């Protein structure tokens, strides 16, 4: 299903701030090293994340699902020098790509990558987060929300990617679309939060904890 007209999509992207030199290089390396790079968030989602960090003043960020580091770099660029972004990933091949960028001078003190199954790593994380970005295995989306909500500070933002899943959530018939639809309903029915779902790329939901 084409959620947004291709020309409209290209038009809106052309009026969105460009990727940095580092991000463009990361995309090139990802495309060279991997067969598929459709998990890259893209400049519109990236710029939205960067703005949310800037607007909220977030200093402690948690990302579930690093992939090759694209969205982490966008957010880290908006972090103050004393800010921290913890990103979780279990794929070592993706880690090998992201590490060469995370180790650059401007990111090595801001970004901390933890390897392993996020469902096992999350319980060991201490403290509260100002912003959480979820873009990991879709089947576990509802579980992630239940685990992560208590770790989000009051007034903090919870951002979820791929909430439209190519339109499959309209008539969910497979395990991933059903899980995403379940999460969407959980957020909608949660009286502890305010939320907005917007049709950017494959759908983004922004949640604010009351």
Image: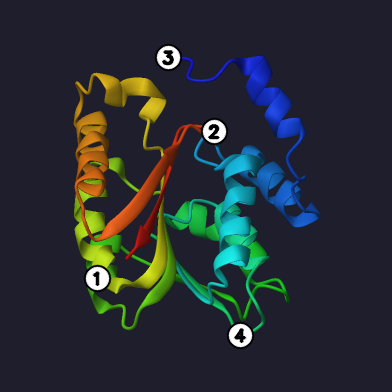
Horizontal relation, residue 104 to residue 188: left or right? right
Local crowd size for mark 4, using a 10 Å CA cut-off: few (<14), some (14–19), many (≥20) = few
Give the number of marks: 4
Q: Are marks 1 and 3 in contact (CB under 8 Å)?
A: no
Horizontal relation, residue 50 to residue 130: left or right? right
- Label 1 and label 3: CA atoms lie apart by 35 Å
Q: Are marks 3 and 2 in contact (CB under 8 Å)?
A: no
Local crowd size for mark 1, using a 10 Å CA cut-off: few (<14), some (14–19), many (≥20) = few
Q: Nearer the viewer, mark 1 or mark 2?
A: 1
Q: Nearer the viewer, mark 1 or mark 4?
A: 1
Circle 1 sits on which residue?
150
- The residue nearer to you, when weighing 60 against 57, is 57
SS state under label 4: loop
- Label 3 and label 4: CA atoms lie apart by 43 Å
Circle 4 sits on which residue?
82
SS state under label 1: helix
Q: Tag on residue 16?
A: none
């Amino acid at each position: 299903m084409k959620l947004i007209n291709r020309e409209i999509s290209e038009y809106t992207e052309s009026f969105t701030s460009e990727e940095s030199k580092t991000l463009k290089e990361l995309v090139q390396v990802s495309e060279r090293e991997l067969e598929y790079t459709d998990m890259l968030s893209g400049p519109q989602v990236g710029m939205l994340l960067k703005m949310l960090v800037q607007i909220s003043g977030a200093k402690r960020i948690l990302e579930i699902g690093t992939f090759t580091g694209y969205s982490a770099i966008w957010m880290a660029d908006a972090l103050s020098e004393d800010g921290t972004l913890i990103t979780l990933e279990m794929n070592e091949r993706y880690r090998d790509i992201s590490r060469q960028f995370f180790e650059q001078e401007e990111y090595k003190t801001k970004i901390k990558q933890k390897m392993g199954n996020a469902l096992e790593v999350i319980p060991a994380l201490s403290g509260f987060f100002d912003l959480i970005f979820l873009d990991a295995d879709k089947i576990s989306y509802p579980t992630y929300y239940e685990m992560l909500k208590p770790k989000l500070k009051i007034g903090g933002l919870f951002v979820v990617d791929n909430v439209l899943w190519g339109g499959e959530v309209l008539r969910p018939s497979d395990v991933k679309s059903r899980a995403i639809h379940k999460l969407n309903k959980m957020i909608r029915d949660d009286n502890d939060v305010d939320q907005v779902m917007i049709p950017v790329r494959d759908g983004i939901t922004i949640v604010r904890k009351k």
